[in-house]
Amino acid sequence: MNWSLSLGDGSVRDVIHWPELTSLDEISKVRGGNPILFPFNGRSYDEGEIGFWRAADGVRRPMPMHGLARQGTFRLALANERGFTAIFIPNEEARMAYPYDYEFSVGYRFSSHGLKCELKLVNLGRVPLPWSAGHHFYFTLPWTPGLTRADYLIRVPATRRLRADAVGALVPGPVLQPEESLANPALIDTFHAGLRSNEVVFGEKGRPGDIVMRLGEGAVPPADAIFVTWTMAADSPFYCVEPWMGPPNAAGHKTGLHWVPPGGQESFHVEIAVR
């Protein structure tokens, strides 16, 4: 939920933002950490109505925004000083929304200046499993006192920018430069697509300590993979850079929708480092 680094001058830098809370009763509404988006990221629509999706069997089913895992229950399967693996335990809501036989796990591996995370879906049933998962990292920003978002730059190797309209269809997004200020409001709710490489870099102008995020294990991500840039308000103490398997509403428009065959499995890998 929170990640910080102890610096050489004795100060502490928060990398992942986590707010002060008195309760975790509504954890899906917390603006912090790294909510896991599964089986689908973003908003889902069926025939223009939000909160639903239609499976291959033609049945319309409910689907909350960002899916089921971020508000769900996990069972710890492995934990040691290097990381942990947790397995999603579907409740009745999850079984109604995604009625398949599967195992979904989240595995973290930590290093001194970074982490790796694997989302893995194993198909235990007899029909193909649709999914398009992702991460919702809340990065502390600004991370140096006295600076503002205008002091930070981001480089995203995208050839196209997209957004979603009011019924979940993909439409052209803003025209952006290869390197943009994080103060640019056009970045908010933008999907960076057509990625030429798997690496996004953002940080303070002319200073060390950049955050480097890599999507996937290949030099170039899958064709429909995207990065999302988002924040809530001009004074929010966080900025989200989110690696997704595909754009939101993947089950509707099919862009970025992956299928795991019966007996098969698929993983989505993300790596983050501070350099």
Image (tube, grey):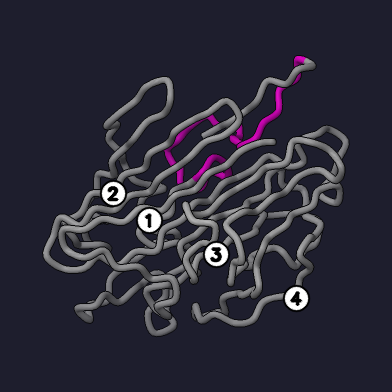
Q: Residue at x 65, y 25 (%)?
A: 5
Q: Decide which of tag 2 and tag 3 comes sooner along the chain.
A: 2
Using the image, determine if residue 266 lies above or below residue 164. above
Label pair 1/4, CB-CB below 8 angstroms: no
Q: Position of residue 199 (x, y in %)?
A: 62, 54
Q: Decide which of tag 3 and tag 1 comes sooner along the chain.
A: 1
Q: Residues within 10 Å of mark 4 (few under 14, many from 20)?
A: few
Q: What residue is pinned by disc 1?
A: 38
Q: What residue is pinned by disc 2?
A: 104
* Part of the protein shown in magenta: 10-34
Q: Position of residue 12 (x, y in %)?
A: 71, 22
Q: What residue is pinned by disc 4?
A: 175
In which quadrant of the rendered view does residue 124 lie?
bottom left
Where, quadrant-wise, is the C terminus in this rendering? top right
Looking at the rendered structure, the kind of residue marked 1 is: Phe
Q: Residues within 10 Å of mark 1 (few under 14, many from 20)?
A: many
Looking at the rendered structure, the kind of residue marked 3 is: Ile
Q: Position of residue 236 (x, y in %)?
A: 72, 47
**Cα distance in 3D space between marks 2 and 3:** 21 Å
Label pair 4/2, CB-CB below 8 angstroms: no
Label pair 1/2, CB-CB below 8 angstroms: yes
**Cα distance in 3D space between marks 3 and 1:** 15 Å
In which quadrant of the rendered view does residue 196 lie?
bottom right
Looking at the rendered structure, the kind of residue marked 4 is: Val
Q: Decide which of tag 1 and tag 4 comes sooner along the chain.
A: 1
Using the image, determine if residue 263 lies above or below residue 151. below
Q: What residue is pinned by disc 3?
A: 226
> Is label 3 or label 1 in front?
3
Q: Residue at x 83, y 32 (%)?
A: 145
Disc 4 secondary structure class: loop
Using the image, determine if residue 48 lies above or below residue 40. below
**Cα distance in 3D space between marks 4 and 2:** 37 Å
